[in-house]
């Protein structure tokens, strides 16, 4: 869009209004586009350095996960998630020597413990690992786009939240989310999902699941800060996102995924 | 008003009513602060952020339990949150802070304190939550079958929930 700005000439006579009009439109369009492609806005004032730019991002290192589901337990307790529903969960991918793969998860009710095997198989297990799932807090959010009353929104820190006083419970967003992270809360009758424990982040605490994780599988951090472990991982390690083909640009990224993980 | 234009005025009147109705309804239904900080009700993030947190951060335990905290940091359980064995302890932490702030005498743990979400001592059921045998954890993670492990190590068969504590210290569980 930069070349369009060069076309502006203040000396153009007034009767040349169509050219002026087109040039102005190009500038406005360019500005609008450059704003829309930016990731989450910041509340920062960089010059003073007093307030640092904050855009939260989440890292799941699946190579460390032991599948204890303590994160799930902490999330349910922290957020009073109704029984039978989960804001975050853990999946187990098991590869067998005969080439088959099974995927299972822990029960949706406490104590969320994984059993010994994923299904019944004659063949020996050749590989197995756990993958934590939670809201991806995408940059291009399908859930916000489809909300007919703008009850789904993104905070200046890039956290996708639901305005529960405004939500009408139509569940369009539940269907729109490619990661199945949303549900209709039977108590509030509104959409519900992982908030990255926004109420904790704003107090300087880490999310409940990150706090409870005994292996350091889950980390939350600020990707604007070059010293932050999440920023370092995002820029120096081989991180991947779930369903990249959906084009939602998730801010939750993973280490150690295989192509079978969806 | 001539007879020939009456139908046009009627249509215009209905159109005006529809526009006014739309604007009126919209004003009623759209929250007042909508759009001032973005395409959402401006108070919504603050309301969400104002929610009371439940799980205390590990660092909140440190000032009073420094020795245990340091011991934990030196062992294999360094990332294991106190709450996994000792309960959420929200009431405990709040009570301790309240007592410290007011300068009053009182207890923040034990039956007289009124704190109900704090547990002491080792409980094998809590060890089992992470260490039960299963397919999936990365290589090197110790998985223990508590129904056979104590006997294998030469202990008497027992139903005592503190059985793990006979050999292991939860704060530094090196075998």
Image (spheres, coloured by chain):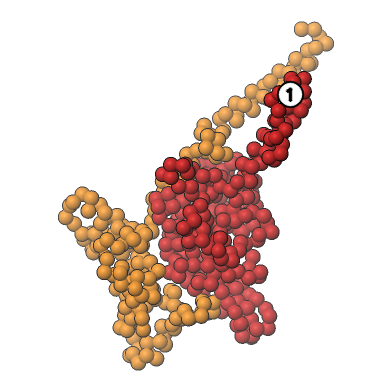
Chain colours: A red, B orange
Q: Quadrant of residue A135?
A: bottom right
Picture coordinates of residue B147, whole percent (x, y): 41, 85
In this view, B128 is above or below A163: below
Q: Quadrant of the N terminus of chain B?
A: top right
Picture coordinates of residue A107, whole percent (x, y): 53, 69
Q: Quadrant of the C terminus of chain B?
A: bottom left
Picture coordinates of residue B21, whole percent (x, y): 63, 25
In depth, the one of B175 and B53 nearer the eye is B175
Identify the residue shown where x is 77% and y is 20%: A15
Q: Is residue A132 visible?
A: no
Q: Residues within 10 Å of mark 1 (few under 14, many from 20)?
A: few
Picture coordinates of residue A64, whole percent (x, y): 50, 72
Element carrying mark 1:
loop
Q: Residue furthest right?
A: B4
In this view, A21 is above or below A171: above
Judging by the rendered image, the residue that carries numbered circle 1 is: A12
Identify the residue shown where x is 30% and y is 63%: B62
Question: In the image, is A223 to the left or to the right of B151?
Answer: right
């Amino acid at each position: 869009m930069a070349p369009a700005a060069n076309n502006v000439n203040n000396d153009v006579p007034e009767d040349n209004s169509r050219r002026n009009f087109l040039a102005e439109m190009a500038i406005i369009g360019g500005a609008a586009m450059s704003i829309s492609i930016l990731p989450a806005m910041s509340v920062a004032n960089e010059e003073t350095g007093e307030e640092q730019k904050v855009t939260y991002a989440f890292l799941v290192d699946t190579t460390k996960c032991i599948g204890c589901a303590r994160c799930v337990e902490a999330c349910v307790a922290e957020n009073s998630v109704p029984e039978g529903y989960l804001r975050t969960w853990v999946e187990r991918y098991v590869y067998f020597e005969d080439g088959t793969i099974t995927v299972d998860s822990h029960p949706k009710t406490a104590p969320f413990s994984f059993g010994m095997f994923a299904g019944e198989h004659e063949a020996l297990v050749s590989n197995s690992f756990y993958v934590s799932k939670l809201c991806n807090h995408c940059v291009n959010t399908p859930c916000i786009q489809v909300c007919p009353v703008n009850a789904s929104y993104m905070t200046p820190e890039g956290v996708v939240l639901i305005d529960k006083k405004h939500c009408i419970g139509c569940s369009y967003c539940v269907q729109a989310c490619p990661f199945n992270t949303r549900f209709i809360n039977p108590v509030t009758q509104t959409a519900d999902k992982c908030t990255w424990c926004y109420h904790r982040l704003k107090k300087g605490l880490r999310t409940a699941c990150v706090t409870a994780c005994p292996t350091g599988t889950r980390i939350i951090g600020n990707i604007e800060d070059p010293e932050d472990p999440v920023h370092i991982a995002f820029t120096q390690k081989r991180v991947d996102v779930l369903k990249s083909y959906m084009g939602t640009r998730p801010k939750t990224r993973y280490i150690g995924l295989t192509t079978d993980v969806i | 008003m001539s007879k020939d234009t009456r139908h046009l005025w009627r249509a215009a009147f209905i159109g005006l009513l529809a526009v006014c109705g739309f604007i009126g309804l919209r004003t009623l239904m759209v929250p007042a602060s909508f759009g001032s900080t973005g395409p959402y009700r401006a108070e919504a993030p603050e309301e969400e952020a104002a929610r009371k947190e439940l799980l205390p951060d590990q660092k909140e335990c440190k000032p009073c339990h420094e020795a245990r905290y340091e011991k934990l940091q030196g062992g294999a359980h360094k990332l294991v949150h106190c709450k996994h064995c000792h309960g959420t302890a929200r009431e405990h932490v709040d009570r301790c802070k309240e007592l410290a702030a007011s300068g009053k005498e009182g207890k923040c743990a034990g039956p007289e304190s009124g704190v109900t979400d704090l547990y002491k001592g080792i409980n094998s059921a809590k060890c089992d939550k992470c260490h039960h045998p299963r397919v999936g954890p990365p290589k090197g993670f110790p998985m223990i079958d508590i129904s056979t492990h104590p006997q294998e190590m030469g202990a008497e068969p027992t139903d005592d929930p503190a059985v793990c504590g006979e050999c292991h210290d939860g704060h530094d569980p090196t075998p």
